[in-house]
Structures are given as structure tokens and as C-alpha cells.
Image: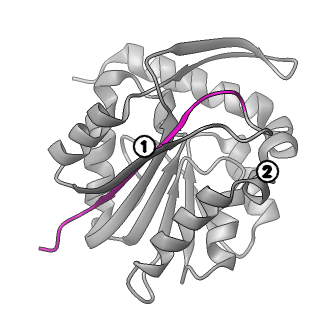
Amino acid sequence: MTDPGNHGRRAAVRNSYDAVAEAYLDTIGGELTHKPLDRALLVALLEQTATGAPVADLGCGPGHVTGWLAAHGAARAVGIDLSPGMVALARRDHPEAEFREGDLLRLPAADGEFGAAVALYSVIHLEPAELAPAFAEAWRVLRPGGRLLVAFHAGTEVRHLDDWWGHPVDVDFRFLEPVPVAELLRGAGFDVEATLERAHYPQEAQTTRAYVLARRPEA
């Protein structure tokens, strides 16, 4: 049975990101220019993606990472986001990529559609019990051998915002611990290939950033 409370929380997240979409793009849309490690991880992911295979950006926001993937070797980059406002901006600014509205728990994608996927700071809006189903969905849409790069704020804190850049919102940011995230990925069927943490860059919020690279095993 579907939990109506979870639907309400996802609706709050959707509405919050719709409200800040333009401000988010203006503030964060160029973030990869000052994130050399993130760019290196994305390049490594692309280099290990099967030739011709599409790459998914799960929780793509205004599409800046999706567009970067398309410009740096992805045969086809597909961004998926819960927020219609974010998807509209992504389609406007990145016609070289494809964008779909969708939920991390019910991805609008076929089984094995993607050769690789990234989920950069998108799982932080899920409830703890939703992480395992979300990782199972990521496993479903990846081809055997496909890799998933997950990024999140490291820790156990939950930050709630009622106001974001002057817009009323209702959204939680859940920090996560790398070891439990890796275990949940293994439970979803992935092999975990790497985990790492880094300090924040000067332009970022002052949180420790964590990354887990996982791979769907060959059939």
C-alpha cells in the first residue's frame, strides 16, 4: 500500500523546487566550473560507459549536469526530475539533451535503458525507508555493467527550510552516512567500486561531500 504521507512529502519537495527554479539556476547552474573532483568523477563514469549507451541524470534540476554530460561524450543524456519547473528550464537551456518529469521511486524509463546514471544530491530528499526502493529503481533502469554515481552531504543531520532565497518552501535536506548508503546499494544488487569524501569548496555550503560509485553486475 502506498503511504499517503510520502506522497505529501514528495509534493512538498516538488512545489519547493518549482518555487526556486529560476533562483536555483542562477545560483547553482554553473557549479561544475568550480568542482574539479566532480568533473573528474563524471569523466571517469563516461569513460566506463558502453559506447552508444545513454546516460541518466536522476534528479537533474535545471539540467546543468545533464548538459555537461551531453557535451563531454555521452551518446545521449537524459535528465529526470520531480519538478516541472526545473524540467522546463532544463529543456529551454539544454536542447542537446532529453528531459522527463519523474519520481526517483518510479523512474520514467525502461528496464536496462541506461549505460550509466548519476544521482547528485537528489536522494537527500528521500525518507530513509525510500532509499532502498530508489536504488532498486536505479538498478532496474541500468544495463548490466552500468555504473551509478551517487553524491550527498555526509552526516546524520536533517536541515529543514521554510524559506529558500526568499521563496516559501517546505523541504528537508537529509545528510547520509557513506557506509550505510553503500550497504543499501549492495542490498539493491550493486557492487560498490569506490567511496570517498571531500571538504566543501569555497563556493559551496559548508558540508562534507560524499560519493559512492556502484556498478550493476554483468548478467
**185 displayed left or right of 8:** left
Q: Name which quarter of the figure residue 166 lies in.
A: top right
Q: Secondary structure at mark 1?
A: loop
**11 displayed left or right of 202:** left
For mark 2, does the 10 Å Cα neighbourhood hold few (<14), some (14 to 19), or many (20 or more) residues? some
Q: Nearer the viewer, residue 84 or 128?
A: 128
> In the image, residue 151 lies at what x, y percent?
49, 45
Amino acid bearing label 1: Leu
Name which residue lies at 55% across and 79% down.
74
Name which residue lies at 46% across and 23% down.
155
Amino acid bearing label 2: Gly
Label 1 vs label 2: CA separation? 21 Å
Q: Which residue is mark 1?
A: 104
Name which residue lies at 78% across and 44% down.
28
Q: Which residue is mark 2?
A: 29
Q: Secondary structure at mark 2?
A: loop
Q: How many labels were placed on the picture?
A: 2
Residue 110 at least partly seen: no
Say above or below: 133 vs 115. above
Q: Name which quarter of the figure residue 2 lies in.
A: top left
Q: In this picture, which residue range is highlighted in magenta?
A: 205-219
> In the image, residue 171 lies at what x, y percent?
61, 19
